[in-house]
Amino acid sequence: MNADPTKKGYIESNGRVRAIKFRNQTSNALAVPLSYLDYTGAKLEVGDEFTELNGKKICTKFELPKRDVKNKQG
């Protein structure tokens, strides 16, 4: 949750991370200082990948379901 609840962020209340674009590239990661996750008690290294630490859900990237596109001939 944001320190200022009147501001919007990229982590939704259910833990989903909203992908945002940086220089026209969609993000595929959540970058935070490792100290933000000290409460989990996990020993982390820069570059570790996870969605959960020591049984605590951290985040999940939301991806839109892919639609089945069929060729239409007119």
Image (cartoon, rainbow, N blue to C red):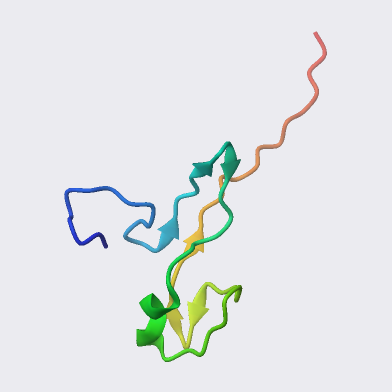
Q: Height in image: 6 above or below 46?
A: above
- How far from the left and from the top, in percent, is residue 15? 40, 63
- How far from the left and from the top, in percent, is residue 27? 56, 50
Q: Height in image: 3 above or below 43?
A: above
Number of numbered discs overlaid on the protein picture:
0
Observer-nearest of 45 and 5: 45
- Tell me which residue sits at (45%, 56%) in the image: 17
Where's the C terminus, which quadrant? top right
Which image quadrant is residue 37 in?
bottom left
Q: Height in image: 48 above or below 20?
A: below
Q: Height in image: 73 above or below 11?
A: above
Observer-nearest of 11 and 70: 11
Observer-nearest of 34 and 72: 34
- How far from the left and from the top, in percent, is residue 43? 51, 90
Furthest residue in direction top, as rendered? 74
Where's the N terminus, which quadrant? bottom left
- Tell me which residue sits at (80%, 23%) in the image: 71
* 67 with respect to 30 (left or right): right
- Tell me which residue sits at (57%, 76%) in the image: 46
- How far from the left and from the top, in percent, is residue 5? 18, 54
- Tell me which residue sits at (58%, 44%) in the image: 26
Observer-nearest of 19 and 46: 46
* 59 with respect to 12 (left or right): right
